[in-house]
Image: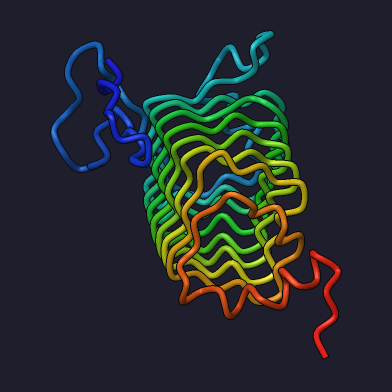
Amino acid sequence: MPPRRKTDLWQPLPPAVDDQPGGAAAPAGGGRRVVRGTVDDLAAAIGELDPDAGGLTGPTVESTVLAGARVLGGRVTGLRLRDVVADQAVLAGIVLDGGGATRVRVTGGRVSGTVWIRGELNDMLFDQVRADGLALRACLVRRARFVNCDLSGLDLTDTRLDHVRFEDCDLSSAIFSGAQIAAAQLRGCRFDAVVGADGLAGAEIDSADLASLAGPMAAALGISVV
């Protein structure tokens, strides 16, 4: 059963899955999958995890631990992730369209160059992840934390952020064009060469971080600095 909803909207709910691959077996009825090794195509891997992957609602991956797994590319429409933990995994060059994610934690590893378009992403934690070139375009991101992550080149074009935190992240060259901020906090982040800085309107940003944001904000507002 999923964890009970907390009152702190800034704190994502954790995945309801045992993330210790070497630990005791899950209780009867709980179940989980542990994925290791290298997969060259995400669609093929999902076909193994979800026998009904061709269903009308799209493939679903749930109660799954990616323990150092490497998924190197693939294109999937309508993917749904539920209660998934990725520990030191590599998820690179993946393209996802639609679908969504609920209660997902990514610790370490790399998701460089991964693209998710029109997804609904809830209760997500990225901790010390290399995610340069990550694109979340036209998505709804709700209750998410990015901590100590390399998010250089992050693309949030036309994405809505609702209670999303960025803590000590590198956001150099990130794209915020058309982003909509319902609630967002950015602390200890780098903003060098950010594009579409006016998309950060409504966000809470540390005063110490404003110096690196001054140039991009001036460009977004059409201000010439002489």
Quarter placement of the C terminus? bottom right
As drawn, is 119 to the left or to the right of 158?
left
As drawn, is 87 to the left or to the right of 151?
left
Is 54 drawn above or below residue 92 in the view shown?
Answer: above
Residue 94 vs residue 10, the one in the foreground: 10
Residue 104 vs residue 89, the one in the foreground: 104
Residue 81 image position (x, y, % from top left) = 50, 28
Extreme-top residue of the structure? 56
Is 47 drawn above or below residue 161 in the view shown?
Answer: above
Is 88 drawn above or below residue 39 in the view shown?
Answer: below
Residue visible at 39% across and 43% down in the picture: 105
Residue 105 vs residue 157, the one in the foreground: 157
Residue 70 image position (x, y, % from top left) = 52, 51
Quarter placement of the N terminus? top left
Residue visible at 27% across and 28% down in the picture: 6
Report the coloring of the rendering. rainbow
Question: Count the marks: how many?
Answer: 0
Residue 73 vs residue 215, the one in the foreground: 215
Extreme-left residue of the structure? 24
Residue 62 image position (x, y, % from top left) = 43, 24
Q: Quadrant of residue 212?
A: bottom right
Residue visible at 57% across and 41% down in the picture: 161
Extreme-bottom residue of the structure? 226
Residue visible at 85% across and 80% down in the picture: 224
Q: Quadrant of residue 88?
A: bottom left
Is 91 drawn above or below residue 223 in the view shown?
Answer: above
Residue 90 image position (x, y, % from top left) = 52, 54
Q: Quadrant of residue 45?
A: top right
